[in-house]
Amino acid sequence: MRILHILDHSLPLHSGYTFRTLSLLKEQRALGWETFHLTSEKQAGCTVSEETIEGWHFYRTPPHSGLQSKLPLLNQVAVMKGLERRLHEVIEKTQPDILHAHSPVLDALPALKVGRQYRIPVVYEVRAFWEDAAVDHGTTKEGSLRYRLTRALDTLAFRQVDAITTICEGLRRDIVERGIAGDKITVIPNAVDIARFPLGGPPDPDLQKQLGLADAQVLGFIGSFYAYEGLSLLLEALPQILTTLPRARILLVGGGPQEKTLKTLAQRLNIADKVVFAGRVPHQDVHRYYDLIDVLVYPRLSMRLTELVTPLKPLEAMAQGKSFIASDVGGHKELIHHEKTGLLFEAGNPRDLTRAVHRLLTDPTLQHDLTLAGRAFVETERTWQNSVRRYQSLYERLLAHHP
């Protein structure tokens, strides 16, 4: 079986999108399938037509230029036209059996048009609704023309593609509510590579000393600093946490749009000396920072994006045997069994977050039980091997209808 994956971006860019892609590709290759990989011109800073990175070969789409590239909406049309042209070239070279387009709809619509011309079935994988992400990033507003247009294009693609996959039940429900038949949609949930996330080890004393955390109870977050992650709520809760847990410290590893805002907030709350911004770290060193953290905190705020979409971070925490606290948004509740694999608190409520932190940091038995149950959950239900196996019957069904 030969599958051409059509992607928004890939390596060398590091993101949750990239890591999911690589996990899918590895397991599909393990099943004996041939995979090919084409990125749109959204692959930032790319000027070559093909390249191999970390052993993975990618076909690239050259960026367009001219007046159209500078005009709103028209520049997105140009992105799709460029991808459409490149698809013809790559299909002639790779002769795929299936076109597998991944979010956003700018990838799905060109795949649909070209797939029909070559009579190749098209799968559209929805990882998030990009109009909701754009609301959080401040590039559009809910209900705006751009928001409604993006949503309408997605719905059009849902109706026309041969099959839809998505990462969670929240997104599946939303698609069904648009009038799409439920049996057209397959959930391929986020998962983890157990081998890549071994159980955590003891903290590195040199790194503890370097970051000023040698005698601390560490609350941590590792990832991108977006507004929807709710990290400001964690900082706002810290003064109250310190009244009962004076050794508590916050370790934030990563970076992103909210970094400056968070540093300013720490100064305003007079907790700057209790919050460590470690910055971005090499991927191979991330485990050293996980080992410093006593309790991971995922305080996502409630909005459409977080209510519908499941994140990877809690699964990674479970895989490493780390205890964690998460807000009770829909995306978390789909992954986390409260008081069994993690603790949930009321989203947006710093007092409830404080109570959860105090409970977990003062109850080692609860921490132990949560970590054991979390590791067992990912080992039995959330490995990439189990998730990717769900593609097999879907692909085979499509090929049976498209000989």
Image (tube, rainbow, N blue to C red):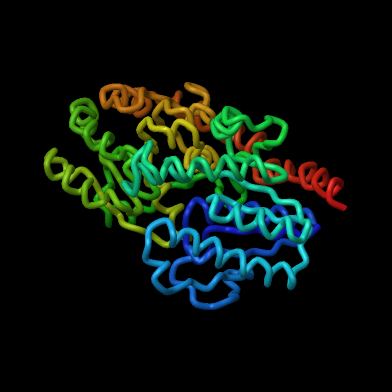
Residue at 27% across, 47% down = 213
Give percent across and percent down for residue 118.
76, 61
- Please identify the quarter of the rendering in which residue 356 is found: top left
Q: Quadrant of residue 107?
A: bottom right
Of residue 51 and residue 75, the one placed in the foreground of this image is 75
Residue for point 67% across, 36% down: 185
- Write the residue at 22% across / 25% down: 244
Q: Position of residue 20 (x, y in %)?
A: 57, 51
Q: Is residue 377 left or right of residue 135?
A: right
When the figure is inspected, residue 391 is found, relative to residue 91, above or below; the finding is above
Q: Quadrant of residue 156?
A: top right
Looking at the image, which residue is at 38% across and 32% down?
A: 303
Query: Looking at the image, which residue sits at the far bottom?
Result: 48
Left or right: 76, with 98 as reference point? left
Q: How many marks?
A: 0
Q: Is residue 348 left or right of residue 4?
A: left
How far from the left and from the top, in percent, is residue 288? 42, 53
Front residue (pair 195, 182): 182
Place of residue 153 in the rendered image (x, y in percent of width and height, measured from the top left):
54, 45
Rendered-image quadrant of the N terminus: bottom right
Image side of residue 80 versus residue 260, left or right? right
Residue 88 to residue 252: above or below: below
